[in-house]
Image (cartoon, coloured by chain):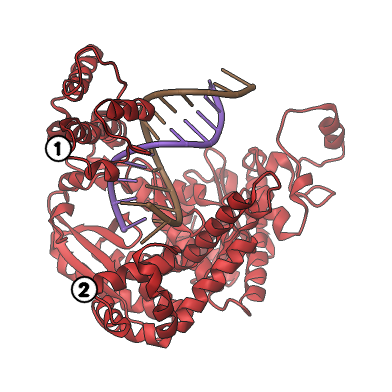
Chain colours: A red, B purple, C brown
DNA sequence: TGCGGCTATTG
DNA sequence: CACAATAGCCGCAG
């Protein structure tokens, strides 16, 4: 094993240099440097991840991986690497969309049409005929595409030699991506950094997927019980409890009424029966009608309990809260138009009541931090609006904005948020001229994004991420004029918001990646990322040091992300045993 | 069985 | 009740 480290060292590999890695259980590990296929005693290596651990300890290269499947495997094996180059993540940055499998990456990087890309579909006569002149040892076909059995299948994992070739191909793709990024950086100077940060975010996601969120099961069950009662011991009992909850609502209606409370249409009928006519039955609409009839209040209570029973109840805990006390979901580093992080298993949208069950483990605390007013501050930064940047010097930037607009704070806030979301109606509409006059650069930035969106033209965020508009954009002849206009407006709002939300996501990831790196020596483990909020699990003795680190990391991140120092970012940081202990 | 609509939860 | 996301159930089409 030391042999590998020595050979890589002799090849001149140092900290931050690209080394590609491909892993396959029971086969070994393939390593490669850009330009060379490196193969050593790969087949005999037992425990391929230990090779990575050794090289990491000795040389700390930037590990090139085809996708987070590899970083996830490393994290699951307990190997923590400092940096990586995630080919799939960079693909999403360069070309937009979500799909980033090797075949697609290869085709797009080499300007090959996706429509004629070889597929792994069922074998037919045509593909058999094609297979005849394809060398199974060669990942690249004569026509230039990546062979389907390498790209989609597991051909690359069959032998040590193929693993090495697969790693070599990843290294080549990474350098080709870097060339693309270099060309792109003329217009989007941040894009190289974004690529590295997106890769870091994938590492962080792999680690969070493995780590999970510490949750106290007993506390969680008490909270669930508060909404839906004790855990039912049988399906029959569950059905009975369900029927009892339904009856609590239906008793407000004439005896013998049959309405399915889970069917929006029948709920409308139910309300009509008691003289309430509504276009839909959403909670915010029913709130206003609480006084009209007691069934409304009963229905709102029922909805809350039903939500817990079906989505965040015992079943949810059983499925995702494993016996070691960690709630586990799968994390993605960049989802949706804006490239935000997402998570499954309800980690991003669990009811706030449940935060009381998110408890640090014995001897540990949470450091929780959230960014204040991140989106308007980001807008000031990416647009370069001096007046708006000036406002960010205040802890509460809506206060100076309100003064400058000559309105109260609440109105100013709604107006600023409204422009970022593309709202054109309502109370804040008449403030728009004043917003334009006061913050002309920021407003022009948003309106330009809106125009591009309406025309179906792709956009790039401040960090250089491609936001594709084409897919849903093109004029659909079947739409009447009003529908077409409404769709165009929706696309305008989408484009407008994607640039703000996307840039905010980029800043957030720089911050999170900085905390991840600097926090390692404090045993600080990021366990949750929530768009503008970080939750770090750390030994109690290091709580305050971690809190300080999180705060200084924000300034470091803001400076790395946007070298313009005129925009100020603020964070609220606290050291707490329970997530719910944070203020506000 | 798959999918759009409705609803609720979060930032 | 704008923008983004995940997730569950209902009703309808195939």
Image mark 1: chain: A
Instruction: Decide: is A248 above or below A577.
Output: above
Q: CA distance from mark 2 to mark 1?
A: 33 Å
Front disc: 2 or 1: 1
Residue A510: in sight, yes or no? no
Which residue in the structure is indicated by mark 1?
A: A223
Q: Which dot marks residue A508?
A: none
Q: Residue at x 17, y 51 (%)?
A: A360
Residue A261, quarter of the rendered image: top left
Q: On what subunit does the disc labeled 2 rest?
A: A
In the image shown, does A515 or A478 lie closer to the viewer? A478
A93 sits to left or right of A252: right
**Dot 1: within a 10 Å radius of its alpha carbon, few (fewer than 14), some, or many (20 or more) residues?**
some
Q: Position of residue A324 (x, y in %)?
A: 23, 38
Locate the C terminus of chain A and report the quarter of the image it occupies: bottom left
Badge 2 is on which residue? Answer: A548
Residue A17, percent across and down?
A: 55, 70
The residue located at (15%, 53%) in the rendering is: A580
- Along the viewing direction, whichever of A12 and A576 lies nearer the viewer: A576
**Is there any visible trace of residue A196 in the rendered image?**
yes
């Amino acid at each position: 094993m030391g042999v590998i480290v020595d050979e890589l060292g002799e090849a001149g590999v140092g900290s931050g240099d690209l080394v590609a890695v491909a892993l396959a259980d029971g086969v070994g590990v393939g390593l490669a440097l850009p330009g060379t296929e490196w193969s050593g005693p790969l087949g005999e290596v037992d425990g391929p991840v230990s090779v990575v651990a050794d090289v990491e300890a000795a040389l700390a290269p930037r590990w090139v991986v085809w996708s987070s499947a590899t970083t996830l495997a490393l994290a699951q094996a307990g190997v923590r690497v400092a940096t990586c180059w995630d080919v799939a993540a960079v693909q999403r940055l360069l070309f937009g969309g979500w799909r980033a499998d090797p075949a697609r990456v290869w085709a797009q990087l080499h300007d090959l049409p996706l429509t004629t890309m070889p597929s792994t579909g069922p074998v037919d006569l045509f593909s058999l005929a094609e297979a005849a002149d394809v060398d199974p040892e060669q990942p690249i076909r004569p026509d230039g595409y990546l062979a389907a059995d390498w790209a989609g299948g597991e051909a690359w994992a069959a032998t040590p030699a193929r693993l090495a070739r697969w790693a070599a191909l990843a290294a080549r793709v990474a350098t080709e991506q870097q060339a693309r990024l270099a060309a792109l950086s003329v217009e989007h100077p941040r894009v190289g950094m974004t690529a590295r940060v997106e890769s870091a975010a994938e590492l962080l996601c792999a680690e969070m997927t493995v780590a999970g969120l510490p949750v106290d099961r007993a506390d969680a069950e008490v909270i669930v019980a508060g909404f839906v009662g004790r855990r039912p011991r049988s399906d029959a009992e569950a059905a009975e409890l369900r029927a009892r909850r339904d009856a609590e609502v239906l008793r407000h209606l004439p005896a013998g009424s049959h309405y399915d409370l889970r069917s929006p249409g029948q709920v409308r009928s139910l309300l009509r029966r008691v003289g309430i006519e509504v276009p839909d039955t959403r909670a915010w609409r029913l709130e206003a009608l609480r006084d009209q009839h007691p069934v409304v209040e009963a229905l709102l209570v029922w909805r809350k309990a039903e939500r817990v029973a079906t989505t965040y109840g015992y079943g949810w805990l059983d499925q995702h809260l494993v016996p070691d006390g960690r709630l586990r979901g799968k994390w993605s580093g960049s989802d949706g138009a804006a490239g935000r992080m997402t998570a499954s298993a309800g980690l991003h949208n669990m009811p706030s009541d449940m935060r009381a069950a998110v408890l640090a483990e014995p001897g540990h605390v949470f450091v929780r931090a959230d960014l204040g007013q991140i989106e308007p501050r980001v807008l000031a930064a990416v647009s370069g609006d001096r007046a708006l940047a000036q406002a960010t010097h205040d802890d509460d930037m809506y206060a100076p904005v309100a003064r400058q607009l000559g309105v109260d704070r609440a109105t100013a806030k709604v107006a600023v948020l409204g422009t970022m979301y593309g709202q054109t109606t309502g109370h804040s509409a008449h403030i728009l001229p004043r917003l334009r006059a006061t913050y002309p650069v920021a407003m022009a930035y948003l309106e330009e994004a809106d125009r591009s969106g309406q025309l179906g033209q792709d956009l790039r965020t401040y960090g250089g991420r491609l936001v594709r508009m084409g897919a849903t954009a093109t004029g659909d002849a079947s739409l009447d004029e009003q529908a077409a206009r409404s769709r165009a407006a929706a696309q305008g709002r989408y484009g407008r918001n994607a640039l703000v939300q996307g840039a905010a996501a980029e800043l957030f990831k720089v911050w999170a990646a900085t905390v991840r790196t600097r926090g390692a020596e404090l045993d600080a483990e990021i366990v949750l990322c929530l768009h503008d909020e970080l939750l770090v699990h750390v030994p109690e003795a290091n709580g305050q040091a971690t809190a300080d680190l999180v705060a200084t990391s924000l300034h470091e991140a803001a400076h790395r992300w946007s070298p313009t120092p005129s925009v100020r970012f603020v964070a609220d940081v606290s050291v707490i045993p329970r997530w719910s202990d944070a203020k506000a």
